[in-house]
Amino acid sequence: MGGFGAEYDAGAVKHTVRFSVAFLNKAAGFYSNHHPVANDYFNNTSYGNRPDFNMLGIDSRGAAVGRGNLRNNIAYTGTLTSNMAGTSSAYNSWDLGVTLSDSQFQSVSTTGWDAPRRADGSLPTLPHLRLAATSTLIDKGVDVGLPYTGRAPDLGAFEQPGDTPPGQRHEAETAPAVCQGTIDTNWAGFSGSGFCNGDNATGAHAQFTANASTAGTATLGIRFANGAGGARAANLVVNGSTVAAVSFESTGAWSTWVTKTVTVPLTAGSNTIRVDPTTTAGLPNIDYLDVNA
């Protein structure tokens, strides 16, 4: 990913590689390719490559150095990693000391990957390299701003259960979302082009519109930052009915973003989802809503 012909460029573009799978390459599965800046490698699965993750980059003198920010990745069989000195690596299979075996996965087959992709462009629905229900890699990751279910992200390219692709993302600053406040950009770490800074008032809500193909339950992920000293309380209102009370705890700083997950009922078709503060403190800053229906 990247690569500048082994020449340093201070203005090099940073890339993000996510929800990807590489297997049985004679060379690297994921390769920094002499890139001069640290790319992000989030939630990927590398199987049987040599190596699975090669983070060979260059520094301002043109010397070899590890470059990359790696979180929630799996490296299994083959040569796991190389050129890691200088990278930021945490919450990956090789960092956590977990024992990997074929039983961690529904299947480790490498056939059938040339099947048609899903309508949203994601990888075909196969059991291959998706986590088994009993895998110890479930909920072992860290929130990097990508959709997930459960207490924490799973490791690898697929959230368990295996047939659930990354869900819909609805940015708070993008219509038809509604922010009763201002769209701001003054705190780092947000997704998209801004975040909703709601008015400090009861009922000063953030509202999203999400589509569901069928009626049923869905897991919502509300990404927020709360630099205030105490929690901020809100009701979660779906299609006009309050379905849950949510407490947005302090994150310690307005630039520290976390995701609150809540399971709610949705109807088939269009749904309005409102985060409605119940005190005059208002909401925390709201970045986006993920819907993994």
Image: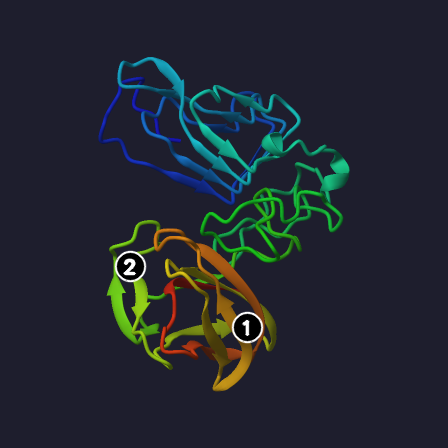
C-alpha gap between disc 1 and disc 2: 28 Å
Q: Position of residue 122 (x, y in %)?
A: 51, 51
Local crowd size for mark 1, using a 10 Å CA cut-off: few (<14), some (14–19), many (≥20): few
For the N terminus, the quadrant is top left
> From the viewer's perspective, is residue 115 above or below residue 74?
below
**In front of the other: label 1 or label 2?**
2
Tell me which corner region of the image, top left, top right, bottom left or bottom right, holds residue 80: top right
Identified by mark 2, the residue type is: Gly
Picture coordinates of residue 183, whole percent (x, y): 26, 65
Residue 167 versus residue 63 in the image, above or below: below
- Residue drawn at (40%, 51%) of the image: 256
Mark drawn on residue 235: none
First in sequence, mark 1 or 2: give its number: 2
Q: What element carries label 2?
A: loop
Amino acid bearing label 1 = Ser
Q: Using the image as rendered, state which of residue 275 and residue 213 is in the foreground.
A: 275
**Residue 86: percent from left, percent from top:** 42, 22
Q: Which residue is drawn at 48% across and 58% down?
A: 259
Direction bottom: furthest residue: 240
| Label tally | 2
Hey, which quadrant is residue 88 in on the image?
Answer: top left
Label 2 neighbour load within 10 Å: few <14, some 14-19, many 20+:
many
- Give the residue at the far front of this rendering: 229
**Dot 1: element:** loop
Q: Name the residue under label 2.
A: 194
Q: Which colour scheme is used?
A: rainbow
Can residue 293 be seen at all in this image of the molecule? Answer: no
Residue at 55% x, 23% y: name it: 81
For the C terminus, the image quarter is bottom right
Residue designated by label 1: 213
Q: In this view, does 54 lie above or below 47?
A: above
Q: Where is residue 11 in the image (x, y as percent from the top left)?
A: 22, 31
